[in-house]
Image (spheres, rainbow, N blue to C red):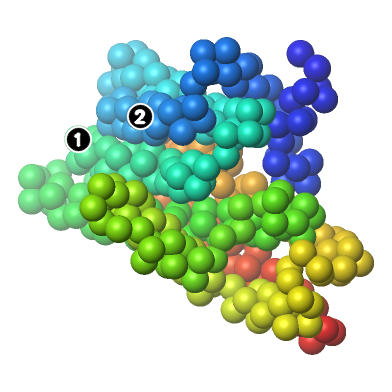
Amino acid sequence: MKKEAIKSTYKSNDTEEWLDRVWTRPIGYLWALFFKRLHVHPNVVTVLSMLIGASSAFFFAHGSYRTEGTEGLWYNLIAVVLLAWANFYDSTDGQLARMTGQKTRLGRILDGAASEVWFIPIYLSLVYRFYCHHELEFSWLGIADTPVNAGIATLVLLGIVLYSGFVCHSRQCGLADYYRQIHLFFLKGVSGSELDNSVQQQKLYDATPWKGNVLWKLFLKTYVNYTRTQEAQTPAFQRLMKGLKAKYKGVEDIPSSFRGKFRALSLPLMKWTNILTFNTRALVLYATCLLDFPWLYFCFEIVVMGALCRYMRHCHEKFCQQLFLKL
């Protein structure tokens, strides 16, 4: 397997994480070759990724060795394998699309939704897991292990999990993905990125009739909201883009010198976008579940990942404002 052949399926060297280069992409490439031979469309691979990732929730719902012994450990190991497998397919779909030229707007929307489809059932399964196995935490806090107390504690955890998932996880991953696409736009231009905006997506949504397109309309509406959330978090970048469009006839006319300057400022942040997407998040999830303290994962997501996301956003907005003032 030639390294150059695998590299040809990257989005770019700038946006690739070390673990992806040595592990995820090579395996994803082999799967891409397999699906290519079978003439499987990349969107089908994305759907398979969603199904496999979501199925891991059943196995994560079980306690691990500390609370369920060897059987629980095996359940959790199966969960880890399934989620890792789903991530391989999440890499495969993009690699297959670049390999075959089968890029579609639906594929972009599905790819962005994949992690949500994985993590929503996983997060809810971990709430159920806490309800079943909370004895040690209650003993630490001196709480009597009664059905009422267990119900109250589980509801509190559910509130934390909903905040962690829909506020922290969703926005962290969405912003990291947006910064990657911005970087690719200045590196490769419109054709080399998937930098969408809410105005474009709203027009497409409005122009699509409901008749015969109900599912597609729902996908588009979700994507409109997704892009609006990204734009709301990046006011300095939005000003910069408006300034560039006003100064130059079109975004493709932005001079290479400016693109190079933007890339140099954006490149150091790519490591944070990688941390905020899957690998680091998954490794912490695996560790906390195998140790039988899955609630620690949500503390990590809210506190640590939240701080990294705020830092990344601060740095990006700061240099975008500086570039805007120099236009």
Crowd tier of the residue under label 1, counting other residues whose Cα lies within 10 Å: few below 14, some 14–19, many 20 or above: some
Q: Please, what is the three-letter code of the amino acid marked with disc 1?
A: Cys
Lower sequence index among marks 1 and 2: 2
Dot 1 corresponds to which residue? 132
Where, by quadrant of the figure, is residue 235 drawn?
bottom right
Q: In this view, does 221 lie above or below 112?
A: below
At which x and y percent is residue 60? Answer: 33, 30
Indicate the quadrant containing the N terminus: top left, top right, bottom left or bottom right.
top right
**Which is nearer the eye, 277 or 128?**
277
Label 2 residue SS: helix
Q: Where is residue 48 in the image (x, y as percent from the top left)?
A: 41, 27
| Residue pointed to by mark 2 | 51
The answer to whether any part of residue 293 appears in the image is no
Tell me: residue 173, above or below residue 96: below
Locate residue 100: give its quadrant: top right
Q: Which of 50 and 273 is in front in this view?
A: 50
